[in-house]
Structures are given as C-alpha cells and as structure tokens.
C-alpha cells in the first residue's frame, strides 16, 4: 500500500465563526506561518503511510489517485471540520478520514505572532502498490 501527500495548501480568503464544529474565532485561509504537522511534511507522509490501511474493495478494483481532505487546524493545534472535498472511492475516502482524524495535534498557523485557526486542503495520494 502506498499513501503520500504532496504537501498541504492553504486556501485564500477568510471565514467567519462557525460554532457548530468547535472552532472559535476567525478561520484564515492564508497566514504568515502555515500550520504544520509536527515533524514536517516527511513525518506526515510517514504517519499516513504507516496508518492508512488500503481497503480490500478498492484493492480489488485497483484504484489509485488523490483524495483531497479539508480540515481546520485550530489555534491550539487540534484538527476540526475534517471532510472529503475530492472523493476517490467511498471506502478510500472513509479510510483517509479515519487517518486524518487520528493525527496528533499540529503546530498551529500564526498571524501577527499569534496562533490562529487555518483551513487547509490536504491531498492524500493512495495506491494499492507497495
């Protein structure tokens, strides 16, 4: 099984308060210092590669491609509002969500030297091959 990310991308623009998902305060799309998985992109790729279990149904169909996962890295580093924004296959989507939801807290994004909420789209590439 193979799963990697080609980095993370912050969206442009800002969003407002959304009390329905545990996020308090403004959600930024672009900040001075982007949030980061602790240990950096290589550590995140390794985390995903180690934890993603390629579903048998998708393996039988030989599905590979990229799943885009939207998330907000909160000012405290916790992840919230995690959802699929570009689907590949229902079972692969569910597995990508499971792995992202299991991630440890990130280093939060910074704006003006202050930790802030930042929304990202995380591309996760999956393949049935080792």
Image: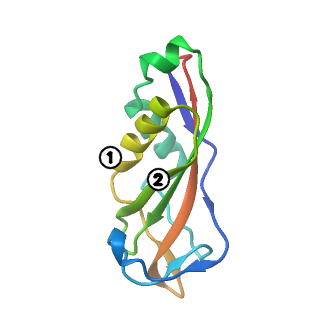
Q: Secondary structure at mark 2?
A: strand
In-front residue for pair 85/96: 85
Q: In the image, what residue occupies the spot 41% across and 84% down?
A: 25
- Name the residue furthest top: 60
Disc sitting over residue 71 in the figure: none
Q: In the image, what residue occupies the spot 50% across and 52% down?
A: 40
The relative height of residue 34 versus residue 96 in the rendered view (above or below) is: below
Residue 123 coordinates in the image, percent (x, y) = 59, 46
Is disc 2 surrounded by few (<14), some (14 to 19) or many (20+) residues within 10 Å? some
User: Sequence-wise, which precedes: disc 1 or disc 2?
Assistant: 2
The nearer-to-camera label among 1 and 2 is 2
Q: In the image, what residue occupies the spot 38% across and 62% down?
A: 80
Residue 8 coordinates in the image, percent (x, y) = 60, 54
Residue 77 relative to residue 124: left or right:
left
Disc sitting over residue 83 in the figure: 2
- Name the residue furthest bottom: 112
Is the image coloured rainbow, by chain, by secondary structure, or in one colour?
rainbow
- Gap in angstroms between the C-alphas marked 1 and 2: 13 Å
Q: In the image, what residue occupies the spot 56% across and 15% down?
A: 61
Which residue was labeled with disc 1?
102
Residue 57 coordinates in the image, percent (x, y) = 46, 17
Q: Secondary structure at mark 1?
A: helix
The relative height of residue 122 versus residue 71 in the rendered view (above or below) is: above
- Name the residue furthest right: 12
Residue 120 coordinates in the image, percent (x, y) = 55, 61
In-front residue for pair 21/10: 21
Is disc 1 surrounded by few (<14), some (14 to 19) or many (20+) residues within 10 Å? few
The relative height of residue 10 versus residue 15 in the rendered view (above or below) is: above
In-front residue for pair 42/102: 102
């Amino acid at each position: 099984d193979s799963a990697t990310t080609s980095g993370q991308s912050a969206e442009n623009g800002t969003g407002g308060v959304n009390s329905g998902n545990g996020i308090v305060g403004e959600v930024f799309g672009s900040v001075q210092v982007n949030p980061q998985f602790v240990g950096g992109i290589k550590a995140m790729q390794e985390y995903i590669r180690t934890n993603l279990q390629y579903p048998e149904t998708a393996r039988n169909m030989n599905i590979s491609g990229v799943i885009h996962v939207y998330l907000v890295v909160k000012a405290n580093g916790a992840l919230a509002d995690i959802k699929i924004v570009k689907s590949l296959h229902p079972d692969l989507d569910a597995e990508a969500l499971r792995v992202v939801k299991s991630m440890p807290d990130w280093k939060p994004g910074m704006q003006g030297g202050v930790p802030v909420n930042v929304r990202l789209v995380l591309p996760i590439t999956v393949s049935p091959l080792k």
